[in-house]
Image (cartoon, rainbow, N blue to C red):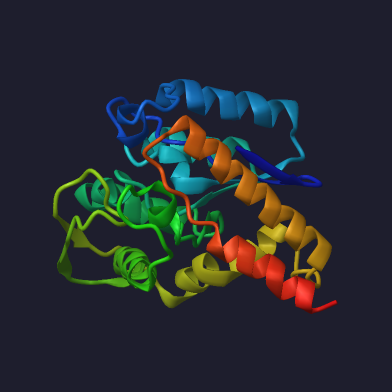
Amino acid sequence: VFTVIAVIALLHAFDVDPGGLFEKRGMAHISWMDYYNDIKDMLKAFPKLRLTIAHFGFSSLHPEEAAALLDEFPNVYYDICPNQYMFPDFAASEQIWRPFFEKYQDRIIYGTDIGARCVLSNGQKTFSEAECHGRMELIDGLLTADTHQIMKADGRYLIGTEDFLLHGLTLSDEILNKIYRDNFRCFIGGEPAPVNPRLVKKECRRIQLTLKIMSFIDKGMAPDTTIAKDAIAFFNKKR
């Protein structure tokens, strides 16, 4: 799924590892290397494209390739929205990933994927505040903690994994400020523009339609579009 504004884009792909969540649910699947090569081909075709790749590009088992992509394409960033493998992989190879985060501290963007559970879960149908806090605790634990902590596989942000031991990367405040805030500002090219209500409502309707189509593809998915509806109602009142 591509969302493109001028030459700024967010690339989001579903699970690209064999036996993963989306393959098990009968949804589209490609190999990780095909996915990686497709991204490289796209960037070569559009060299001015500024691209953020969600979920770290599903690269948590491929640190060398992840680094090579950043080295070759200076306009590419990774975000750290959790997926079902990423944080257990980081925890298992912290000696690899701490130097990676330090070297590429200007190319990593904070992200949470908050709300994913109510989109993808068969059980939860509405937006969960507990999920929000859980995801932020997981991400902050990876970036900041200097002790080991047990992360529970509770079915929210850790779908399809066991409990695991997470040791934080203990990044410096300077690096944390870049990941939490400054890198996103750099990516979008300065301060955000004023909100355009018409475009917000258009995007909300696109999200509603996308989730409806996804629910037809995956009969077990019960998407919640409440937030999109609320946003449309909010801006309608602002007229």
Is residue 147 found left or right of 186 in the rendered image?
A: left
Determine the residue positioned at 43% across, 34% down: 218
Q: Is residue 151 visible?
A: yes
Coordinates of residue 195 in the picture (x, y in percent): 78, 70
> Of 196 and 32, which appears nearest the observer?
196
Classify the position of the C terminus by image quarter: bottom right
Determine the residue positioned at 50% across, 59% down: 105
Coordinates of residue 113 in the picture (x, y in percent): 46, 57
Is residue 57 found left or right of 4 in the rendered image?
A: left
Is residue 52 found left or right of 25 in the rendered image?
A: right
Q: Is residue 11 visible?
A: no
Determine the residue positioned at 51% across, 37% down: 214
Coordinates of residue 238 in the picture (x, y in percent): 80, 79
Answer above or below: position of 75 versus 106: above
Answer above or below: position of 137 versus 89: below
**Residue 173 quadrant:** bottom left
